[in-house]
Amino acid sequence: MNEAPVHNYERDVGSKTTLRFFYPESAYSDPVLDNNPDTLMVLVPFKNTDIMWMKTIVNNEKRLKQGFWRNPPMIWNVKPQNMRILNPYFMEVAATKLLGYDEKTKKLKGRPTTGFMAISFAIHFCDLVHIAGFGYPNFNDTQPIHYYDKSSMKALRVTEHKIPLEAMAIRELLRHNVIQNLTYF
C-alpha cells in the first residue's frame, strides 16, 4: 500500500509485490527499489487531480503542483503498461456497503483508507483474502500506523478516515470468514 517500503523489510513483508495501491501523494517510494519490474501500480483516485497527475506522468506533460495535500513525485519511473486506475466502483462498495451509508444525513460515514480499498478490491477478485497489519486494537493516539515510520493514530484524527468504523467493518468481514487475518486484531 502507498509508500510502504519493501527494501530492507523483506524479512517482514516479503519480496514480491504484485499490486501496489497508491494515490499521488503516497507514490514517494522508489518504484524500482520497492517493487518488482512487473508490479502493477494501481492508482486509487480520491479526486480529479489524481487522475490528471497520472495522465501527466504517462504522457510526460507539464506536471501539476496544485490540488495535493503533499507534493506527488514529478518524475516517476514506472512503465505505462504497469499502471492501472482502480475502478471507482470499489470505492463505492468500500464506502457504502462495507463502511456504511448514513440514511439520515445521506452522507458517507467515512472515507475508506487505501488499505481498506485494497480489501474491497481483493474480496471481489480473490478466492482467499488474507490481511496483515490492520490491527487497530486500542485506538490510542500513540499506536503506530505503519511499520516503516513513526506516524501514529493521532495523525489520522485530522483526516476523513474513520478508523474505528473501518476496524468494525474488518471485524465483521473476519467474523463472516470473508477475509482471514495473518496478524493480531
Image (spheres, rainbow, N blue to C red):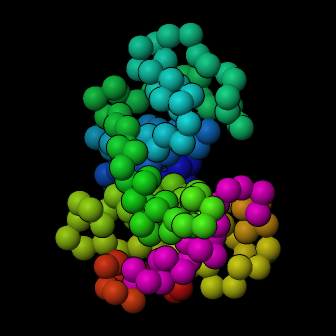
Name the residue furthest top: 62
Residue at screen point 34% across, 37% down: 84
| Image quadrant where residue 148 sits | bottom right
Q: Nearer the viewer, residue 169 or 179?
A: 169
**Position in image of residue 93 (x %, y %):** 39, 59
| Image quadrant where residue 173 sits | bottom left
**Residue 46 is inside the magenta segment:** no
Residue at screen point 60% across, 67% down: 104
User: Magenta span covers which residues?
Assistant: 157-174
Q: How many marks?
A: 0
Residue at screen point 58% across, 43% down: 26
The answer to whether 89 appears left or right of 63 in the picture is left
Dominant SS in magenta:
helix
| Image quadrant where residue 41 sits | top left
Name the residue furthest front: 104
**Residue 10 appears in the figure:** no
Q: Nearer the viewer, residue 102 or 29?
A: 102
Residue at screen point 34% across, 78% down: 179
Q: Is residue 32 above or below residue 153?
A: above
Q: Is residue 156 above or below residue 131?
A: above
Name the residue furthest bottom: 175
**Residue 139 appears in the figure:** yes
**Position in image of residue 37 (x %, y %):** 32, 39
**Position in image of residue 19 (x %, y %):** 35, 50
The answer to whether 15 appears left or right of 126 in the picture is right
**Position in image of residue 83 (x %, y %):** 35, 34
Name the residue furthest left: 127
Q: Nearer the viewer, residue 179 or 184?
A: 179
